[in-house]
Image (spheres, helix red, strand yellow):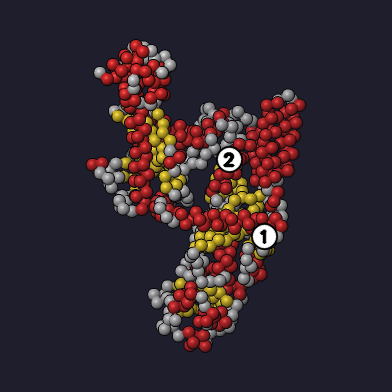
Amino acid sequence: MNTCFDSVAFLKNLTEQPGVYLMHDQKGKVIYVGKAKNLKKRVSSYFNRGALDTKTLQLVSRIAYIEITVTHTENEALLLENNLIKLHHPRYNIVLRDDKSYPYVFISNHEYPRIAFMRGKHHTQKGHYFGPYPSSSAVRDTLLLLQKIFKIRPCEDSFFAHRNRPCLQYQIHRCAAPCVHYIDPKNYAENVTLATLFLEGKNQEVFAELAKRMEAAAEALQFETAAMLRDEIQQLQKIQEQQNIFIEAKSADVFGVAQEGELISVYRLMIRRQQVLGGKSFFFESIPDQNWLHSFLSQLYFNETADLPKLIITDSPIDDRDLLAQVLFESKERSVRFISHPRTSLKQLLDMANKNAKTALTAHILRQQGFAHRFDALQTLLGLSELNRIECFDISHTRGEATVASCVVFTREGPAKREYRQFNITDITPGDDYAAMLQAVSRRYKRRLAEESVLPDLLLIDGGKGQVTQAKKALHSLSISLPLLGVAKGTGRRVGLEELVLEEGEKLHRLLPDSPEMQLIVSVRDEAHRFAIKAHRKKRGKERVTSRLSDIPGVGMKKRQALMQRFGSVKAIKEATILELTKVTGISESLARRILETLTS
């Protein structure tokens, strides 16, 4: 026990009223905040040596003094405790470091409304907000579904106002192209209404309207339109069937918990309007407070932007849950019911949440190793809401010959080599790196959009302001907005003196070469450079080999391809025998002799 703190004298005069206690260390820093219905009884429990576990003993050993705030009721104590935890971030409390506002689906007020991702309900843009969703990926999945079915535009109003022909979104059937009046305002408004009903959970009304349109199209012999509407109905019905398990929980948050060593993982599964909106993981170091789940929930729901469900489901009972429900009702003016150890379909939900908590914990431990801390540092430096995937482009050529672009992908686990791609650059002025970058980025993300593939959280460009500008131009043409960062060679092209260029052309302050942010940037850039050079050398060698073969009379394109397909390289062709060469279709003995004479001369 800490000899600096006289617990006997302190407890002797301590009140039995409700209130909050703040434990301070020798430096005066708050290390723990707690609330109590009876302050004397609760604080005394910390000094009962025989009933304490190791972590609580460690907490008590650091107490220099305890500060007391008496409240009128236990309700007031709960609210004050929550505020003080957020203020002081005590070491031994559960601290919910979740200060980002939740994402929403946004439909604007416009003649042709746009549908978009928005973070935070209180936004300057006027329109309708649907949510909140637990993560940005959940919003993007919803947006993708709505675009595919209802063809609502995602582009900014400024982009929309200056179009004279449809963009890629129309070509891949995700937009009705209202910018060029391919759909009249009335029909577009009807699509927006259906999307709104879907977001409000009124699926039956959406089904009825789509079925009505399908029948009308069939009667008018517009069979292609009718078939399209049929497919949309089937897709929505499939989603509806997947949600049948959640009928019992129309509005619920289900909390799964997993623990390994000192780490605790909590997974929040959000269900609204009988639909699973997705989940979000929270991670904490193991703490001495046995009421940590109660503390976690109070911090989560007392947030001004928090969305309170009608039902909260947990695996273990929550201490003082009646108190928590009462205070939530008073502050949110909404009632909530707590259920622990549920049965029937609710148990399936809890099993799902627990499984996700375990999976998330395993992934979190992996993220703490290797590249994880570098990703976190770069995310903080650039002020990104998420940074789980980086894609980097580089251009390689020899005086304009055999220009190749590389794209490498890094995740928090390191390089994702299966997702690397290379691009043979054509139809540009040899040596024009700007045009090459524009073509590579355009081709990459045009295909990613068409394949409905995940986009990166950061696009890294090997180059300065010019290359970054071209990448930004390519993304803008596809109605994509991604954070961009250029890595330009520094003075004398020396390693460690690289300049970081933001998408606006501004230079980021120089980082130390051994900083985690710079280590990540350089490792990704170097990998893109290595991959580009490898692809360039392969292409250059192949082109030079092909040119040598093309100089041989009687060896046309088909025979060159057949030779390369069989032997793989000019070196292998040169080392082959006449008999081996004649086994290639179209190669006679005399032509085989001519090939060997030419290549060995």
Rendered-image quadrant of the C terminus: top left
At x 39%, y 75%, the residue is 27
422 relative to 241, above or below: above
At x 66%, y 64%, the residue is 340
**Label 1: which secondary element:** strand
Q: Position of residue 72 (x, y in %)?
A: 60, 77
Q: What residue would you read off at disc 2?
A: 144
Gap in angstroms between the C-alphas marked 1 and 2: 29 Å
Q: Residues within 10 Å of mark 2 (few under 14, many from 20)?
A: some
**Label 2: which secondary element:** helix
Evaluate whether residue 268 shows in this view: no
Q: Are marks 1 and 2 in contact (CB under 8 Å)?
A: no
> In the picture provided, is 297 more to the left or to the right than 241?
left
Rendered-image quadrant of the N terminus: bottom left
Q: Position of residue 143 (x, y in %)?
A: 58, 42
Q: What residue would you read off at disc 1?
A: 311
Please state which of residues 555 and 260 is positioned toward the viewer in this rendering.
555
Q: Position of residue 52 (x, y in %)?
A: 52, 78
Q: Quadrant of residue 581?
A: top left
